[in-house]
Image: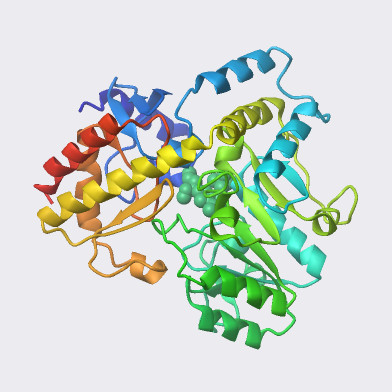
């Protein structure tokens, strides 16, 4: 593979954009080397500026579940763009997407559109605090809910009392209202509630985690979390920015048959254009401005182009539920065959998966939380990532990410991927 043009573009980008990227994970810091610059994408394939083609397993970190440049999505955007791109006034397109999204997910009465998953999660926390009139929130280590201050927190010294900032610029004042719990650890969670009676506004969780690799909740974990929140009059927030409309039409709520109080969305709901959203029942959503007092706003929220791309994507998913069957079959095939190859090559590994999300960890013990995800052999991962890249397979450039399969992926593409893995295993 030649990356000449990408390296020229990277050099230029670094002069005017911090690290040459607009989101850190794109910079390949976890795997070394220089980022590759995309020129276009179609279906299951990414093309870089040097003309190399890759089978895409990140799907823009989730949004492109139908595959890139889906004809129905392109057709609808092309039609709508001719009417103008932004009005700062309500449009019917927002109501259409809102009605469609709410018809697909269980037990949500209203939805508010924003421009990113970060905005959705930040707003959901503010809404939960406004509704409960409590300050503290609980999040789980290794879960990522975007880059707003309340979430850039790690477990503090007074561990079950309050957190500490894990980024410069986040104040101790903010950190004191975020408490960190280990994923899948119910007894720890109970001790936090015991220490903070009537102070917890909400617990926010990725119902299937995708930011420490893919981690599935232990049987009963989410159900008990729901019970604890009910017992303490705290709200349960499912961050479904990754899982929403991906794991199923109704996302993780449908898969696990558990209803959260507030659910956040992103990625798929925008079909590749910037959309985040948060949804809840009327009594909570009606606390939001302009009806209620919890303020939240956005110039480009509900943007007509973004609503159109989101509508075309959700409509396709809603009308063809065999897409989910097909995605799950493809992931199952990939997983079974990867396990055979890695076992044959005597590689220590774990594979976690749920629906069309999957992650590979180079370690011998199960990956059930952030600490166990840290046990992966990063040198192996770097060799694996770059080896697969050279074979034309684009994987997430970090061991703490999930793959996102798109439905344009064919079984031939998966066989091509598996042959690449066979070659790469020889160099591990
Ligand atoms: P955005 O602000 O990036 O749209 O969404 C933030 C977010 C919220 N919640 C979950 C569960 C998420 O996974 C994300 C963002 N995911 C990352 C991938 N780990 C986006 C990729 C990136 O940061 O460039």
Q: Position of residue 407 (x, y in %)?
A: 42, 33
* Residue 250, placed above or below residue 64: below
Residue under the image location 44 percent in, 41 percent down: 325
Scheme by which the image is coloured: rainbow
Q: Position of residue 329 (x, y in %)?
A: 37, 42
* Residue 115, placed above or below residue 144: above
Choose between 82 and 172: the one closer to the eye. 82
Q: Is residue 144 left or right of residue 396?
A: right
Q: Is residue 6 left or right of residue 149?
A: left
Residue under the image location 43 percent in, 36 percent down: 59
* Residue 386, placed above or below residue 237: above
Q: Residue furthest right?
A: 291
Residue 281 falls in image quadrant? bottom right
- Name the quadrant of the N terminus: top left
Q: Is residue 38 left or right of residue 66?
A: left
* Residue 277, placed above or below residue 79: below
Residue under the image location 69 percent in, 49 percent down: 278
For the question of whether residue 203 can be seen, the reply is yes
Q: Position of residue 360 (x, y in %)?
A: 29, 54
Choose between 426 and 253: the one closer to the eye. 253
Residue 54 falls in image quadrant? top left
Q: Position of residue 367 (x, y in %)?
A: 34, 66
Q: How many marks?
A: 0
Residue 41 falls in image quadrant? top left
For the question of whether residue 273 can be seen, the reply is no
């Amino acid at each position: 593979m030649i990356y000449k043009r990408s390296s020229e573009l990277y050099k230029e980008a670094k002069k005017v954009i911090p690290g040459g990227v607009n989101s850190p994970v794109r910079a390949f810091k976890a795997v070394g080397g220089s980022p590759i610059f995309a020129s276009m994408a179609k279906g299951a394939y990414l093309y870089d500026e040097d003309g190399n083609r890759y089978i895409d397993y990140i799907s823009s970190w989730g949004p492109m579940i139908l595959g890139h440049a889906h004809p129905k999505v392109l057709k609808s955007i092309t039609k709508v763009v001719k009417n103008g791109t932004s009005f700062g006034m309500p449009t019917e397109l927002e109501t259409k997407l809102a009605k469609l999204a709410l018809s697909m997910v269980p037990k949500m009465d209203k939805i508010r559109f924003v421009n990113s998953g970060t905005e959705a999660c930040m707003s959901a926390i503010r809404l939960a605090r406004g509704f409960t009139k409590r300050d503290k929130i609980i999040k789980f280590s290794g879960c990522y809910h975007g880059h707003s201050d309340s979430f850039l927190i790690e477990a503090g010294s007074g561990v079950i009392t309050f957190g500490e900032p894990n980024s410069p610029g986040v104040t101790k004042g903010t950190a004191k209202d975020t408490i960190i719990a280990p994923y899948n650890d119910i007894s720890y969670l109970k001790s936090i509630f015991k220490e903070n009676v009537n102070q917890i506004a909400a617990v926010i969780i990725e119902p299937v985690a995708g930011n420490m690799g893919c981690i599935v909740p232990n049987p009963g974990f989410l159900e008990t979390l729901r019970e604890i929140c009910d017992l303490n009059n705290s709200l349960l927030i499912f961050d479904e920015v990754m899982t929403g409309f991906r794991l199923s039409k109704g996302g993780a709520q449908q898969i696990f048959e558990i209803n959260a109080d507030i659910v956040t969305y992103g990625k798929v709901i925008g079909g590749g254009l910037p959309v985040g959203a948060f949804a809840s029942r009327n009594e909570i959503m009606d606390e939001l401005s302009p009806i209620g007092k919890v303020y939240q706003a956005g110039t480009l929220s509900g943007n007509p182009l973004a609503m159109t791309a989101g509508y075309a994507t959700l409509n396709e998913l809603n009308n063809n539920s065999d897409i989910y069957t097909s995605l799950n079959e493809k992931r199952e095939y990939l997983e079974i065959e990867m396990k055979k190859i890695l076992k044959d090559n005597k590689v220590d590994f774990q594979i976690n998966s749920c629906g069309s999300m999957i992650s590979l960890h180079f370690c011998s013990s199960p990956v059930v939380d952030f600490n166990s995800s840290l046990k992966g052999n990063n040198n192996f991962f770097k060799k694996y990532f770059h080896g697969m890249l050279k074979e034309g397979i684009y994987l997430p450039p970090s061991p703490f990410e999930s793959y996102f399969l798109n439905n344009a992926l064919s079984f031939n593409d998966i066989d091509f991927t598996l042959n690449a893995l066979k070659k790469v295993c020889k160099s591990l």
